[in-house]
Image (cartoon, helix red, strand yellow):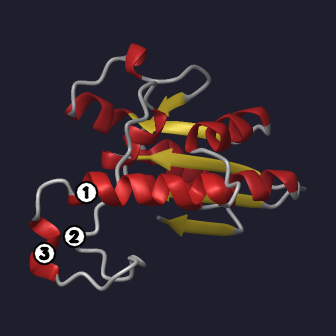
């Protein structure tokens, strides 16, 4: 019987996208049955249009080339700069893109579940999302998570 990994993805940022996809794709490669439940802002990770950003605001651990005092972080354009900087670093280090990791998950049999309540709450349409995902509620995911060997909230 395969081990099971259950992940709840609630963040819709560029830096928040990597942990669930990396962990799930690695688990699948190791023979785990893996499912990711995308809820609230995490639904952004399942959309056709991946326009993910990084915000240095409220993220004191973000490594910046120079220390940035909190008050400076509200300057217009800093979020765009931080996003560009992160994308550049990821590319330079040869890290797969979020879209590539998402595709690897699908190809590896990781089930990507859109929280139906959140889909309804934010008035999303099925056409907003990539093909190959499923929809379900908290009860559906919790049934799997209650049997999982590892459950993570990201």
Q: Position of residue 73 (x, y in %)?
A: 17, 71
Q: How many numbered marks are there?
A: 3
Q: Could you tell me how far apart the alpha carbons at marks 1 and 3 are, in whole angstroms?
A: 11 Å
Q: Residue furthest front?
A: 66
Q: Residue furthest top?
A: 127
Counting residues from the start of the chain, the first of labels 3 and 2 encountered is 2
Label 1 sits on residue: 79
Q: Position of residue 151 (x, y in %)?
A: 59, 66
Is 46 situated above or below 16? above
Taking depth in this image into account, of 135 and 88 the one nearest to the observer is 88
**Looking at the image, do the residues carrying marks 3 and 2 touch, with CB atoms under 8 Å apart?**
no
Q: Quadrant of residue 123?
A: top left
Instruction: Kindly identify the residue that appears in the image at 22 percent across and 32 percent down.
Output: 122
Q: Position of residue 143 (x, y in %)?
A: 57, 51
**Looking at the image, do the residues carrying marks 1 and 2 touch, with CB atoms under 8 Å apart?**
yes
Instruction: Kindly identify the residue that appears in the image at 62 percent across and 39 percent down.
Output: 102
Label 3 sits on residue: 72
SS class, disc 1: helix
Label 2 sits on residue: 57
Instruction: Kindly identify the residue that appears in the image at 38 percent across and 20 percent down.
Output: 128
């Amino acid at each position: 019987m395969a081990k099971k990994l259950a992940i709840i993805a609630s963040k819709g940022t560029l830096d928040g996208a990597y942990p669930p996809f990396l962990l799930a794709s690695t688990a699948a490669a190791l023979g785990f049955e893996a499912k990711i439940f995308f809820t609230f802002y995490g639904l952004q990770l399942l959309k056709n249009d991946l326009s993910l950003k990084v915000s240095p605001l409220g993220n004191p651990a973000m490594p910046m080339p120079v220390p940035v005092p909190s008050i400076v972080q509200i300057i217009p354009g800093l979020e765009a700069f931080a996003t560009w900087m992160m994308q550049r670093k990821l590319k330079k280090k040869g890290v797969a893109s979020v879209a590539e990791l998402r595709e690897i998950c699908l190809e590896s049999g990781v089930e990507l579940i859109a929280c139906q309540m959140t889909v309804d709450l934010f008035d999303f349409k099925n056409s907003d999302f990539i093909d190959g995902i499923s929809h379900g509620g908290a009860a559906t995911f919790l049934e799997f998570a209650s049997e999982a060997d590892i459950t993570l909230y990201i």
